[in-house]
Image: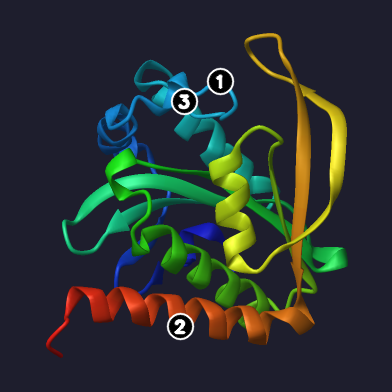
């Protein structure tokens, strides 16, 4: 299945194949919190967004699957995520390039987006593993990955040189296929809490 055929939809979010038509909405989303100012995160500025989207779309030729994340309640595009470095021969790949408007952080958006991605990855693609990587100093990202149920595999020291010239240590996490049922139950429980909070009298 190609990225153009894949749209993942839940109760809170829809993950739509990333297109050039998403650029304006993503520029608005990234301004919410000025996310590109975070030195430890690789988030495009509004001026860089068109090139960012164009590059992401071109990588789909190599098996990457970039998505725009739509909040189904507001119908606004609120960020991006993608599968990348996909290795079909080894049935594994990474989930990353994930960022959301600041107002969406801490909501059900990321939880359900990750749930949909991993459900597709393990149940449709029958993958063996999914990997997550983040900057050593990106504490918010590390906590979010750990809350998913991912386990730390290690740290790639002096792994990347960032655009500001600093050198990044990359923390590597993964979830493997036989862990998915427990991770799935955990994410479903988290989503149920969001529903209960939104409908306290239900």
Callout 1 crowding tier (Cα within 10 Å): few <14, some 14–19, many ≥20 = some
Query: What is the spatial separation of the Cα atoms under label 1 and label 2, in whole angstroms?
Result: 33 Å
State the SS at label 3: loop
Indicate the quadrant where residue 151 lies.
Answer: bottom right
Callout 2 crowding tier (Cα within 10 Å): few <14, some 14–19, many ≥20 = few
Query: What is the spatial separation of the Cα atoms under label 2 and label 3, in whole angstroms?
Result: 33 Å
Image-based side of 116 in relation to 64, left or right: left
Q: Which circle's residue, 3 or 1, is located before the other in the chain?
A: 1
Q: Which of marks 2 and 3 is in front?
A: 2
Mark seen at residue 56: none
Mark seen at residue 44: 3
Residue located at (80% from left, 74% from top): 128
Image-based side of 97 in relation to 94, left or right: left
Residue located at (71% from left, 13% from top): 166
Mark seen at residue 189: 2
Whether 29 is drawn above or below 34: the answer is below
Answer whether residue 116 is visible to the viewer in this image: yes
Q: Name the residue under label 1.
A: 39
Q: Decide: marks 3, 1 in contact (CB < 8 A)?
A: no
Towards the viewer: 96 or 186: 186
């Amino acid at each position: 299945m190609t990225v153009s055929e894949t749209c993942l939809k839940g109760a809170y979010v829809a993950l739509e194949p990333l297109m050039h038509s998403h650029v304006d909405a993503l520029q608005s989303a990234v301004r919410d919190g000025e996310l590109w100012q975070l030195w430890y995160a690789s988030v495009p500025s509004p001026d860089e967004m068109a090139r960012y989207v164009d590059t992401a779309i071109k990588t789909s030729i190599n098996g990457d699957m970039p998505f725009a994340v739509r909040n189904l309640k507001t119908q606004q595009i609120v960020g991006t995520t993608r599968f990348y470095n996909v290795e079909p021969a080894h049935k594994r790949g990474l989930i990353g390039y994930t960022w959301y408007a600041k107002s969406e952080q801490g909501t059900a958006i990321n939880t359900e987006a990750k749930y949909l991605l991993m459900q597709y990855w393990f149940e449709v693609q029958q993958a063996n593993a999914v990997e997550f990587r983040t900057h050593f100093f990106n504490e918010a990202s590390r906590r979010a990955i750990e809350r998913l149920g991912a386990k730390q595999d290690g740290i790639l020291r002096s792994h990347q040189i960032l655009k500001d010239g600093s050198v990044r240590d990359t923390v590597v996490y993964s979830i493997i296929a036989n862990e998915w049922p427990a991770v799935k139950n955990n994410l479903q429980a988290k989503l149920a809490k969001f529903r209960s909070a939104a409908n306290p009298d239900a």
